């Protein structure tokens, strides 16, 4: 593996690498950075937590120059959520301190006026969520005509959240001769069809295939009755510990309800979802990171891209409707080489969603080994221990047929 000093980065970028504490480039950084430095458009897919933010910030900033007052940004990063924007800006501030440039972010949930003032002063790098960016473009506060580098971050997530029309409007406001960098957890057919045309002759980087989970995360499943989930969660936290735990659920109101139950049972818990204000969400993340809150109860707004270290384990109280969301949820633990584990509660109505996840991964999730003594309800889901065998046999048959075909071709 090449070191950062072998990738062609500027001295300023290498100084930022040292300050950020990076030792060796991750695979997505090693493959994407030379292409970005060469001026190519890039379409990259890698699991969350693999260093995509640095892969587009380190090679771009030095060559942008400085903007003057009232000028629009030279680089624009569009990302789906406020938390992702904040995380990107934190890395960007380190890089910009070494390149002597200015960065700012514009996101929803906070006042417009400070963002308008920051744009008027001039910023070289702008990090934005789609809705707030379009608002500021609409009132004349943000001009994208000078954008040289456009980054579409977590493109598949933006599609899931219905931002495709917004992305197209933003792209149309940028110059045609820009460099476009598309980063995504997956390059699904949906992404390639809808967002792929926004990049020109891209270098394609794929680090992990669709459905790949981190090897550092042990996965378990537990069949329960729907009405038993709350008490099983309480008992689980008492047994396994309630520090640095993320609990995922399907709905905003359900997240609030679970949080109230946990607090009544004596746990320190905070909800985080789309109905919380930016300040509330930022405070919950800060308290969790500082150890002041032990349990975060979240919807999928937290499943992508949020880099929280040393998460002990993840609990999926509800099986996600989208199989890929499971991959991102459990990716909150077992990060940066740490070990972690994840448990998913499955009721009878969620069995097919479980099977969709297992088919995506090409693996069967193991039964939770410490389930003895849990009150899982009167009618818990029955998890067939032989589920997946037919699919595994079919895959084995296809592999055997391919081997026979190759053998005949070589004769």
Image (cartoon, rainbow, N blue to C red):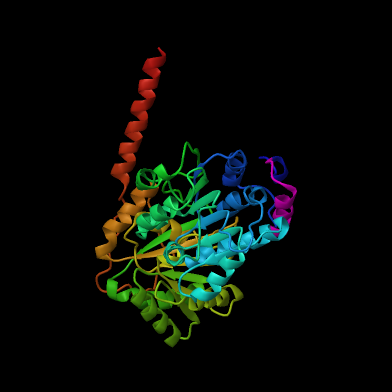
User: Depth check: 98 or 259 in front?
Assistant: 98
Start-end of magenta stretch:
7-20
Q: Position of residue 364 (x, y in %)?
A: 37, 51
Q: Quadrant of residue 39?
A: top right
User: Depth check: 195 or 123 in front?
Assistant: 123
Kindly identify the residue that appears in the image at 31 percent across and 52 percent down.
356
Q: Quadrant of the C terminus?
A: top left
Q: Position of residue 254 (x, y in %)?
A: 34, 76
Q: Position of residue 319 (x, y in %)?
A: 34, 63
Image-based side of 73 in relation to 323, left or right: right
Image-based side of 220 in relation to 389, left or right: right
**Image mark count:** 0
Q: Position of residue 98 (x, y in %)?
A: 72, 57
**Is residue 240 rendered magenta in the image?**
no
Kindly identify the residue that appears in the image at 58 percent across and 59 percent down.
71
**Is residue 15 rendered magenta in the image?**
yes
Q: Is residue 242 among the parts visible in the rendering? A: no
Q: Is residue 93 among the parts visible in the rendering? A: yes
Q: Quadrant of residue 263?
A: bottom left
Q: Main secondary structure of the magenta part?
A: helix
Image-based side of 72 in relation to 191, left or right: right
Kindly identify the residue that appears in the image at 34 percent across and 57 percent down.
322
Kindly identify the residue that appears in the image at 59 percent across and 76 percent down.
291
Q: Quadrant of the N terminus?
A: top right
Task: Decide: is 36 above or below 72.
Answer: above
Image-based side of 140 in relation to 102, left or right: left
């Amino acid at each position: 593996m090449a070191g950062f000093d072998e990738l062609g980065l500027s001295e300023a970028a290498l100084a930022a690498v040292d300050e950020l504490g990076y030792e060796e480039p991750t695979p997505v950084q090693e493959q994407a950075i030379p292409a970005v430095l060469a001026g190519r458009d890039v379409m990259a897919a890698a699991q969350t937590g693999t260093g995509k933010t640095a892969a587009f910030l380190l090679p771009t900033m030095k060559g942008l120059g400085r903007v003057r007052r009232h000028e629009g940004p030279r680089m624009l990063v569009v990302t789906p959520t406020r938390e992702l924007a904040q995380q990107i800006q934190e890395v960007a501030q380190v890089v910009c301190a070494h390149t002597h440039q200015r960065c700012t972010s514009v996101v929803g949930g906070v006042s417009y006026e400070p963002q308008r003032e920051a744009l008027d002063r001039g910023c070289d790098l702008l990090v934005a969520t789609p809705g707030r960016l379009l608002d500021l473009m609409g009132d004349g506060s943000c001009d994208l005509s000078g954008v040289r580098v456009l980054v579409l971050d977590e493109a598949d997530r933006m599609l899931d959240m219905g931002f495709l029309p917004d992305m197209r409007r933003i792209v149309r406001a940028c110059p045609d001769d820009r460099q476009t960098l598309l980063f995504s957890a997956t390059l699904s057919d949906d992404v390639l069809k809808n967002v792929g045309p926004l990049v020109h002759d891209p270098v394609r980087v794929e680090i992990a295939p669709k459905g790949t989970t981190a090897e550092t995360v042990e996965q378990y499943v537990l069949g329960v009755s729907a009405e038993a989930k709350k008490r099983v969660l309480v008992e689980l936290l008492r047994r396994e510990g309630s520090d640095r735990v993320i609990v995922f659920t399907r709905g905003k109101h359900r997240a609030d309800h679970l949080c109230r139950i946990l607090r009544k049972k004596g746990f320190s818990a905070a909800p985080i979802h789309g109905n919380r204000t930016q300040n509330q969400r930022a405070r919950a993340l800060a308290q969790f990171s500082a150890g002041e809150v032990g349990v975060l109860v979240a919807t999928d707004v937290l499943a992508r891209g949020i880099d929280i270290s040393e998460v002990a384990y993840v609990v999926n109280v509800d099986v996600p409707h989208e199989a890929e969301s499971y991959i991102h949820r459990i990716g909150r633990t077992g990060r940066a080489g740490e070990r972690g584990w994840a448990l998913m509660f499955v009721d009878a109505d969620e069995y097919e969603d479980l099977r969709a996840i297992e088919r995506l991964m090409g693996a069967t999730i193991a039964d939770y080994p410490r389930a003895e003594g849990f009150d899982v309800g009167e009618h818990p889901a029955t998890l067939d221990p032989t589920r997946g065998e037919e699919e595994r046999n079919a895959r084995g048959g296809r592999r055997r047929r391919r081997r026979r075909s190759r053998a005949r071709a070589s004769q």
